[in-house]
Image (cartoon, rainbow, N blue to C red):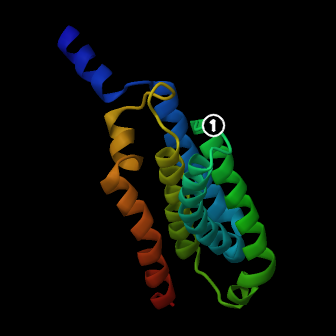
Amino acid sequence: MAPYTSKLALVIGNPAVDVLIIIFFLAAGFLWGLLGGKSKLLSFLFATYVGLFLSSLVFKMLDEYMIAPKSQYRNIAVYFSILIVVFIILERMVLRIFSRVGYRWWQAFLMSFLAVGLFVSGTLAIVSLKGILVISPLTRSLFVGSSAYLFWVASPLLGLLLVSRGK
């Protein structure tokens, strides 16, 4: 029994955190697809892209000018602040144009899961996981690392292409 227990411990590093991440991904993707609406979904998707891009630039500026001490809490606060501001701007001003175009139910769910996956992967990429979270190799392979990050950055763009042609 001990060899199986040790192999299981390798797969599930910290089950509470792993389960929390997976449940958040599934629940948020489902609920966002069900209740979010096209305008909010696209605003969130574009705000996530802009937030990930701008936050890395802001981190470098804060470090260069020593404005705020470098920490994962500062990084996540900056990322969420940028994400919220950009989301509000896009939701209120720019993306009302897209509300005229209809989505089918499967398109809304596809885009919501891809947007939430990008958000989870981007958030875990910003937060330095050393000493804070211990996640399993399965969860790490789904959301953390360069190949997972590349997948979550590229897949919403491919999803938008699929949704735009799937009418």
Please, is residue 127 above or below residue 118 in the view?
above
The residue sitting at 63% across, 53% down in the picture is 79
Q: x%, y% of residue 85? A: 75, 63
- Front one among 82 and 135: 82
Q: Which residue is outermost to the left?
A: 3
Q: Is residue 25 left or right of residue 31?
A: left
Q: Is residue 18 left or right of residue 49?
A: left
Report the amino acid beneath label 1.
Pro
* SS at badge 1: loop
Location of mark 1 (residue)? 69
Q: x%, y% of residue 127? A: 52, 41
The residue sitting at 47% across, 70% down in the picture is 156
Q: Quadrant of the N terminus?
A: top left
Q: x%, y% of residue 58? A: 61, 57
> Is any atom of residue 137 visible in this view?
yes
> Is any atom of residue 1 visible in this view?
no
Q: Is residue 36 left or right of residue 138?
A: right
Please, is residue 57 above or below residue 133 in the view?
below
- Front one among 66 and 159: 66
The residue sitting at 68% across, 86% down in the picture is 98
Q: Is residue 155 left or right of residue 86?
A: left
Q: Which residue is outermost to the top?
A: 2
